[in-house]
Amino acid sequence: TNATPEQTAQILSNAGFKQAEDRSGKSGKPLNLTFSPQPKSEHGEKKYWFIKGRDASQDGKVFVISAVVDSEEFEIATFRKDAKVTDGAAEVDFVDNPHEDASRRDLTINAMYTELTKSDGENSKLCDPTGKGWHDAKHGIVRTVGKAEDRFNEDKLRVLRAIRFHSRFGSGSTMDKDIEKAIPRFKHMEGVALERIRDEFLKGLLHPDVDSKKYISIYKRTGLLEKVFPGVTFDPPNNMPLEIADKKDKPLALAWLLQHNSVDKVAAALDQTRRVGVEDTNSGW
């Protein structure tokens, strides 16, 4: 939306939504509201809103408000451009249109918008600022908005996101040529927190619509699997039995991949801390 977070909060409050506690996980300035919102009661409400996202600036600028209706959450983000990006953490500036907002997104299929002109019934007006999103979604193409190297340089974790989306929506075992060409430069994930790498890997592995065999094969082929599980050997994913690849029990595929390692090796790879340089770092496991 082109509504600011303050305007979004006003609209929600006018519609009977009460305010809940900040859930952004970051500290920052409160919203500059021109009204006094009604607080959410301890016993719960069917309609309430809260601060969901803040940027990496010193003030912790709010850019996402979440609205909850009967336990279903809707994230409402203001159109924005990234003013400064460090390890995926951005300071944001607001813009008033989806075209500028699309230019900062990672993949063309993630840069499409539907204008909500009807409060009830189908909204079918599609905005595709890159001119490629709809085509790519229809043809199983997963590619970045602009050059892959530029998008990955803004946030290296986007490499893993690209693999996840390709394994879910893409056709073929290899990804877009521009993405494949850029991966070797970013595969070491320098500066990216190990917890973020672990979370992104599991998000793909455990998703019911992700092809486990394709997903793990790409990780193995690109050398990224060694970043997730250092010090272990992997069975070739191509040899994975069809019965395992097709199972909805996703961790089974991972167990098959690691089966010829000792318990000690696997335990070491999944330890809560991992040595990075001269420091022990939280691994997220």
Image (tube, rainbow, N blue to C red):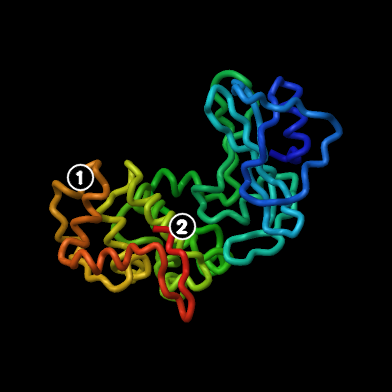
- Whether 189 is drawn above or below 68: the answer is below
From where the camera sits, is residue 206 visible?
yes
| Residue 74, picture quadrant | top right
Q: Which residue is mark 1?
A: 246
Residue under numbered circle 2: 143
Give the side of residue 159 with respect to residue 220, left or right: right
Q: Is residue 209 above or below residue 28?
A: above
Q: Secondary structure at mark 1?
A: loop
- Three-letter amino acid code of the residue under disc 2: Arg
Residue 20 position, x and y percent, is 66, 32
Residue in front for this viewpoint, 198 or 2: 198
In the rendered image, the residue lying farthest to the bottom is 278
Q: Amino acid at mark 1?
A: Asp
Instruction: Give the residue displayed 39% in from the left and 53% down from the top.
Output: 164
- Rendered residue at 70%/30% (across/down): 19
- Of residue 259 and residue 240, the one placed in the foreground of this image is 259
| CA neighbours of label 1 inside 10 A, class few (<14), some (14 to 19), many (20+) | few
Q: With respect to residue 13, does 239 lie above or below? A: below
Q: State the image quarter where residue 187 is shown.
A: bottom left
Cα separation, mark 1 vs mark 2, equals 26 Å
- Screen quadrant of the C terminus: bottom left
Residue 27's spot in the image, x, y percent? 70, 51
Question: The residue tagged with tag 2: helix, strand or loop?
Answer: loop
- Tell me the tag on residue 41: none
Query: Quick check: 7 left or right of 169?
Result: right
Q: In x, y percent, where is residue 171?
A: 32, 52
Q: Earlier in the sequence, mark 1 or mark 2?
A: 2
Residue 100 shows up from this direction? no
Q: Which residue corresponds to the image point at 43% horizontal and 73% vertical from the top-left?
A: 188
Assign the N terminus to one quadrant of the image: top right
